[in-house]
Image (tube, grey):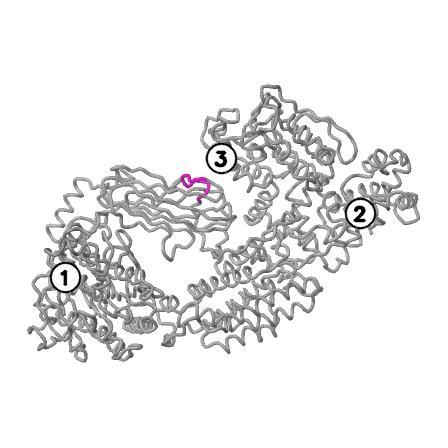
Amino acid sequence: MSPLNRRQFLHNLGVSTAALPFLNGLPSLQAASEPAGLSAKRQRLVIMFSPNGTLPSEFWPEEEGDQFQFKSILAPLEPFKNKTLLLKGVFNKITGDGDHHMRGMSCLLTASRLLPGNIMGGGGAPSGWAGSISIDQEIKNHLQSRPETKTRFGSMEFGVAVPNRADPWTRMSYLGPNQPVAPVDDPYRMFSKMYGQMKDKDTLASILDDVKDDLARVSSKLSSRDKQLLEEHLTLVRNLETELKRPADTALAHPMPPLDPGVELTNDNTPQMSRMQINLLVNALANDMTRVATLQYMRSVGQAQMRWLGVEEGHHSLSHEPDDNKESYGKLLKINTWFAGEFAYLAKRLSETPEPGQSGSMLDHTLLVWTNELGKGNSHTLDNIPMVIVGGAPGFQMGRSLKLDKVAHNRLWLSVAHAMGHTQLQTFGQADLCAEGPLALG
Amino acid sequence: MENHAPSSRSLPENSLAKLLGLLVAAPLLLPLQAGRGAEGVGAKIYSESCAECHGKNGEGVHGKYDDPLAGARSVQALTRLISKTMPEGKEGSCVGPDAEAVAAYIHSTFYSAEARARLHPVRESLSRLTVAQYQNSIADLVGRFRPGFDRPPGTERGVRGIYSGFAILTPEEEEAAKEALKKKEKKDRKQEKLDRVDPQVSFHFGAESPVPEKMIASEFTVRWNGSLIAPETGTYEFVVKSENGIRLWVNDVEERPLIDSWVTPSVEVREEKKSIYLLGGRTYRFAVAFFKFKDKSASIEVWWKPPHGILQPLPREALMPQEVRQSMVVNTALPADDRSDGYERGTTVSKEWDQATTAGALEVIEHLELHLDNLAGTKAGAPDRLEKLKEFSLKFVETAFRRPLTPEQKEALIERAFQKSPTPALAVKRLALFALKSPRFLYPALSSTEIPDDFTVAARLAEVLWDSLPDPALWKAAQEGKLRTGEQIEKAAQRMLADPRTKAKLAGFFQQWLDLERAEHAAKDATLFPEFTEAVRADLRQSLQLFLDEVVWSEASDYRQLLQADHLWLSRSLGKLYGREVAEDGFQKIVPAEGQRAGLLTHPYLLSALAYSKTTSPIHRGVFLSRSIVGIQLKNPAVAVAFEDAKFDPSLTMREKVTSLTQNKSCTGCHGVINPLGFTLENFDALGRWRTQDNHKPVDSGVSFEGEDGKTVRLTAAADVARLAVSSEKAHEAFVQQLFLHSVKQPPAAFAPETAAALTKQFEAGNFSIRKLLVQIALTKALQGLPPEPVKVAALPR
């Protein structure tokens, strides 16, 4: 821990630097800094991404505080207003190589500079991948390091209509420098990752009777010596059958979700894909397969054609149009409102699921963060990037609209990490942007 | 004694040769019959003078002479042995005609291999697929639905490179472009393309473009397309070195690249490594994508480390410009097969094996799930999708079972599965899983009908020659009833011989026969032999492979060449070590010195493996020559004695040390054979280099050698041992036996007591063609139990 961080840490505890010498060697300090009883509860984090900036005047409420009105884009969140926290004034202050889209995307969750590289964007210098771990993976590593918060997957990366290419515009989650994590945008593949083994077991169990019959049939024509080999084989099959009948080690709290068969991964099927992925995500959280997840819609500079909204043009092209182009403005409004609707659906599903062993719903114990790589599409600004938080967590007072003073987004990720129990984390990403510590959101 | 061929069917091409072989064999066997039978002189002498210690039927008597009387000595050699040494205490009392009569009796009643086979008939044992058979069967089963995936590599080598970039403009063109820009006309920049076959993916463009006079240097892309030839089964490591953006695909070019380094973090050359498991004798799709964007320089090198090889630039010989389709390679590791009898066979099952075959089957159905519509030739929502999926399932099950289903089976299996499953895709998965877990797939013999038919023959041919399932051509032949006569079956086998799968199978045979696994790990003392590097060992291995390929796949395919060739394939670095400068790159066929080398017997890869880390080992070499080359069976040593160099007088030669080590009477039985043979190779040091001195004394490689026929010959060099083997029926039979075991995975005697002997006769009559022998071995298996051919059989002597 650097001196700065140590001071910061003590400051956060409310201990002045004057007391510093006396604190050395206090063994209980670290333990005491953890919120009491957190380990017994499940706290979750889901970060949702949609691309190409928003329409600020249709997005940010005029008011500050707990008395505020949603603008049209956020209208779908009305049922969850008292569980919503809107943070205007969060800036992505990361400079360096890469154009705004690239830094907007690949520095969004890492909050540090991109590495130099060979990928040329629409401006600035060419760049490579992100230079450090992303916040979701940082929190995952923390949770996975402790038995009481360890889960089967640790983190899950969902995608919706993410193009099959790997570059700084398509990746926001990183295991570390140069190690992008690809989101899974195929619900069938995700389902297979979650339940593949069980599905296999079912298929396997369904054929073993036939295999046994077959063994008996072919065995009847054989000499006694050869029969013996097949006897041994039959015993192995019987043993396998017994193993398959044994109940799984941990019974599922929630049944495997049904999956519509045969939906193709096409642009026009995106709404179905989105709902399938959200249902799988909620199921994974409910069955405690993970406590950290990302949900990435398309990609930065994504050109999704949202024909289901009556929009033929590509999203990114539309986002470049000036504000006074009424037609494109109207389409962008539809597009962003649709994303808000998907986000609200995620909140709704969680609010309908009771929290195991606790009062309230799963939503009360989950932080849902919806963000974007740009503040505004046609200006490519990294200021005022959308940050909509729904749900609940220690240290987060919901039901408010806040206007923060140009704070670095590093500090928001610190607050989130602390809420997730990763309280030792004193800086995240580019350290000099963390000098003022986590945002106080309580 | 009946003298018949492995089966009672006629083989047209070789029938004359075979007949001759049989006629030659008959007189040799006749004298044996004289001593046979309980009433003969031999029998009387045996029961009076021998049975007390050796047992009534030569089975041995506990406490007197434990070991059964069994071996490979000739009647003559037995006679001599008896005359000299028997009965114990009364030596010299059984000589002349008496010794001859008792030797003939022993030989024909229980001593010889034929006698033992008659007394204890060997039968084919039911066997499951071996690891190699499982992997190959799966690859070919899924490959049925990707025609062309197994296209043979042809002769063209290298990889197709497609270079694209912006053209360098002439001043006029540049002017025109500026004008267009002014007028805000959109005009595409002029492109330059180059399409050619590159020998390798290895380029250092520097700051230039690949086409300096035509293409601009600041940004360009290259795509290399082709296929990769995997010589051996195992893990292949790929390494790409580049400062630019690259992707590399092996086998699967649709899914994720094996190496994805498209976004590069820095300007320095990076190395990206990934491994992939591939089956030998097959080709795999290979592609590399490359791009440069304003980087200061551009370069790319693709390296590989094949199984048993060293890391080296991916060579031209391993690449071909044609593109093949994806192969299904099972990644599940299967437990190693039983090798206790010297060849891999599937005569046991275990929990690990059952689990592995389950995991393997699940891997296949996952692959099917991912590619189902493509493999079944349909697509989502197609009106005939259900029909196509049923067709797919039927073909899958039939291919796995190596025969068509009856209408009743179709109904009971396919139709029922589709009725019972919620979706057609699930029905396909269940059927595929069932097929792969069924004994009919896992035990090839179980899919046969009670009376073998055309499909049985097809399955047996594929098993023996390819370790796999019938391909579409074999299937078609079976369907059309064209695998009935010996002539038809031989024609099919001939066609199969040219397939790379046969080559892969034979490569496995040499691996086993020559114990190449041992050679791979034969490191030498680094202070004494610093020049014997890993790279040299890899070159030696390649040198041996080139030699085996050259001999086996030449027109003559002559076994004698394997033992007698006087050349070596040498590379530059091997040339330095083994006595002849090699000027060019690659391997050259070189005769180091007249009369020194004798094929496999003196190949330095084997000689260095059959040696200690500091010195030669005449014992290891002698055992190899006895068992594998000359065909003398050896018992395991009575007492294990370690060779400890430090215990000997330091002035002795290796020959002197070994002689002294094995002088004990209990050793001489076998070492009387082993040592002389081993000493003939003393002119080759621990690396297999020629030498005339050992420990500052002249090398003495001359020996007297008494063969199993009782004759003593003088041997002074490896070439003499080779000549001995080439003219010895026992040696030929030993080779036949080894190849048979490896190919069929059953002992030849399981087919008929005389199978090995009859095949040996054919082998000799067929000018020792290894390929012809392989065909005959395949026919032995294929024809087993087939109803006799009505017309042709009459022509055979009964």
Observer able to see residue B687: no
User: Residue B21: image x %, image y %?
Assistant: 77, 43
**Crowdedness of circle 1 by 10 Å Cα count: few (<14), some, many (20+)?**
some
- Of circles 2 and 3, the one toward us is 2
Q: In this rendering, which labeled residue sits more in front, label 3 or label 1?
A: 1
Q: Tell me the amino acid under the disc marked 1.
A: Asn
Q: Which residue is mark 3?
A: B539
Where is residue B563 drawn, in percent x and y?
64, 34
Q: Nearer the viewer, mark 1 or mark 2?
A: 1
Image check: A27 left or right of A68?
right
Badge 1: chain ID: A
Q: Evaluate if marks 3 and 1 touch, with contact meaning CB atoms under 8 Å apart.
A: no
Q: Which residues are magenta?
A: B310-319
Q: Quadrant of the C terminus of chain A?
A: bottom left
Q: Is residue A349 magenta?
A: no
Q: From the viewer's perspective, is A268 left or right of B496?
A: left
The circle drawn on residue A12 is: 1
Q: Residues within 10 Å of mark 2 (few under 14, many from 20)?
A: some
Horizontal side of B397 relative to A343 (left or right) equals right
**Mark 3 and mark 1: Cα distance apart in space:** 66 Å
Judge whether B531 appears above or below B146 on screen. Answer: above
Q: Position of residue A340 (x, y in %)?
A: 19, 73
In percent of width and height, residue B229 lies at 47, 46
Relative to A214, does residue B140 appear above or below in the rendering? above
Residue under circle 2? B60
Q: Amino acid at mark 2?
A: Gly
How far apart, in angstroms, are the residues tagged by discs 1 and 2?
A: 91 Å
